[in-house]
Structure formats: C-alpha cells, structure tokens
Image (spheres, helix red, strand yellow):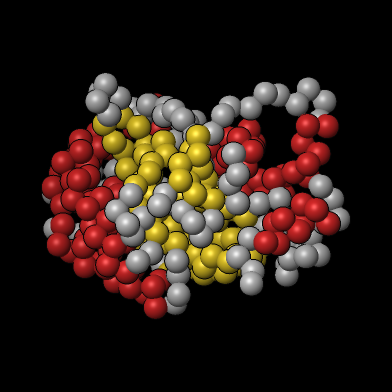
C-alpha cells in the first residue's frame, strides 16, 4: 500500500474579529471543513494570527507596532485554540505564524506545528523581508527542524525563506518529504515570487512543496491590510506525476477556501531512483556546491 498523506492548504481570509470567542468559532469552522474532506494535515498561512490585533480595538490594529504588542497578549489563547482542535479531530495542524517575543526580548516570526497527542514543534523564519526588518522590527530566527509526524517527514520554510535554495536543501538532506510554505504577500508580484520559489524547490529537491496564503483586504489592519495569493501543491516535473507542470493542485486567486491534495510519498522515492533526471542526487555536481546548514530531526510519538 502506498504511503500517502492528505493535506489541506488554506487560502485564509483576514476577518474583522472583535473577540477571542469569534476567532475560536471561525477557526473551528475552518478546521471542521478540512476534516470532513479527509485532511490529515492542515496548513494555515504566515501572519494569519494578526487578525487578532483587532480584538484590542481599531486604534491598536491600525498601529503596526501596537498590533505586534497586542499579539503577545493573545498568543497563548491563539495557540491553545489550535491545540484543542488538533486533539479533538485527531489531525496535525500548522498554525498561522505569529510575531513572538522570546525570553531574550527578540521578536521572531514563528510557526507552530500541533500534533493530536499534544506534542508541538516550531520553526522560526530565518531570512526577513525589508518590510519585516524596516517596518515591523522583527528579528531573524534561527534553527531548522524536520518533523517526523509518522505520516510524513515535514519541513517548514516560512514565505521568504522558500526563496533561498540552501534552506530547502538542508531540510531535504535531513529527510523532509514535504516542505510547508506558509506565506503572506500583499501583491500578486509577491505571491508569484513565492509561488515560483515553491515550484523551484520541488524541482531541485524532488520533494513536495505546499504553499498556503492569506487573502482579502483588511483596511483596519496595519499589519495585514492587503493580501493576495493562492494555495498550491508542487511536485517534481516528471512523467511519474500527473501534471507535466509540476503543479498538482492550485486554488483560484484570492478566493477564501481550502485547497486539497493527497500526496503519494512513495513516488518521491521512485522519481529519485527512476525519474527522467536526478536533481536531488546531482546537487553536489554544481560547481562550488556549498556546505549546508544542518537541520535537526524531531520525531513525534
């Protein structure tokens, strides 16, 4: 029997919510919609958390730095909501990333992975965009992890991180079969930049890449006021896969919805052994192929 994993990737709308209870109702509805369609792993996008700043009032949500501060107050309840739904439905969930203050005072962009047995893992964004550095004041994170959730080995490259090949390569060298790319892009230009990076990482590493995105406008938010994109599932371009383009599934631009795909993990092994080309194997044949960062493997029970 083939090893498969069914994944739901969100095109997630930024809504004007005025209470944590309203957020919990929204999140429960989204998770239930994915579970009914058989999803085993649910992927929410980068900075989906920032809609919570509106709970503190428009005077807060319209101020970028006040919004980031407000998130430090809400983040525990935000993550608890994901953890509860993960356990209730017996699924794995990558929560929408959040600006998170660490013990040393730095604020990183962190995505947290929740497992139904209560275990969690997290990945920080390593390379920041101009806006995150110059406007948000976010600090670069550190460390790379591959999470063995039993169903598959999962790596996470948050938005801009997907545009740097060595990050994905390090994850794949540590065994990643699927790389999740939660993203938040204001314009179609930003979306296609990340989308094209996802397709390239899938080709280079002969691995699956899954993009999730925020969608819709929120004039009341200084952080996520404009959002453009579509969720997508990318694979190597090889006759063993159904799509010559390498795009397995892709949602309509800017629509609020889930996009689903069932990924056959055994095909990755086959394409690396018997595919038309051997991109994963031939990486080191590049002139001056660099040393790679090391990714830690975290195995969940």
In the rendered image, residue 13, in percent from the top left (x then y), is placed at 36, 61
Answer yes or no: is residue 229 visible: no
Q: Is residue 191 above or below residue 88?
A: above
In the rendered image, residue 195, in percent from the top left (x then y), is placed at 59, 51
In the rendered image, residue 37, in percent from the top left (x then y), is placed at 44, 77
Q: Which residue appears farthest toward the front when viewing the image? A: 301
Please tell me which residue is depicted at 77% across the width and 52% down the height of the picture: 272
Please tell me which residue is depicted at 84% across the width and 50% down the height of the picture: 277
Task: Locate the N terminus and report the quarter of the image it occupies.
Answer: bottom right
Judging depth in this view, the residue of 299 and 141 nearest the camera is 299
**Residue 256, quarter of the rendered image:** bottom left
Judging depth in this view, the residue of 115 and 205 nearest the camera is 115
In the rendered image, residue 2, in percent from the top left (x then y), is placed at 64, 69
Q: Is residue 167 left or right of residue 140?
A: right
Q: Is residue 165 above or below residue 240?
A: above
Judging depth in this view, the residue of 152 and 224 nearest the camera is 152
Q: Is residue 99 above or below residue 213?
A: above
């Amino acid at each position: 029997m083939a090893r498969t994993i069914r994944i739901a990737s969100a095109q997630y709308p930024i809504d004007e919510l005025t209470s944590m209870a309203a957020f919990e109702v929204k999140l429960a509805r989204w998770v239930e919609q994915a579970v009914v369609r058989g999803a085993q792993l649910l992927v929410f996008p980068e900075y989906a958390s920032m809609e919570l700043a509106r709970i503190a009032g428009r005077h807060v949500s319209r101020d970028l730095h006040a919004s980031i501060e407000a998130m430090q107050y809400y983040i525990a309840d935000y993550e608890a909501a994901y953890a509860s739904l993960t356990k209730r439905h017996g699924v794995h969930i990558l929560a929408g990333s959040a600006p998170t203050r660490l013990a040393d005072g730095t604020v990183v962009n962190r995505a947290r992975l929740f497992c139904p047995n209560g275990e969690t893992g997290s990945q920080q964004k390593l390379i920041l965009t101009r806006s995150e550095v110059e406007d948000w004041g976010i600090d670069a994170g550190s460390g790379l992890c591959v999470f063995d959730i039993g169903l598959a080995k999962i790596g996470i490259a948050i938005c801009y991180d997907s545009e740097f090949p060595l990050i994905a390569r390090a994850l794949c060298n540590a065994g990643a079969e699927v790389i999740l790319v939660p993203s938040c892009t204001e314009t179609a230009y930003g979306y296609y930049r990340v989308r094209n990076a996802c397709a390239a990482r899938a080709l280079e590493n002969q691995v699956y890449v899954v993009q999730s995105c925020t969608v819709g406008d929120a004039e009341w938010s200084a952080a996520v006021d404009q959002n453009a994109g579509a969720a997508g599932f990318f694979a190597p371009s090889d006759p063993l896969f159904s799509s010559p383009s390498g795009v397995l599934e892709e949602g309509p631009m800017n629509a609020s919805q889930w996009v689903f795909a069932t990924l056959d993990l055994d095909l990755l092994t086959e394409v690396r052994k018997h595919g038309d080309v051997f991109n994963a194997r031939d990486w080191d044949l590049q002139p001056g192929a660099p040393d790679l960062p090391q990714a830690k493997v975290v195995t969940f029970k």
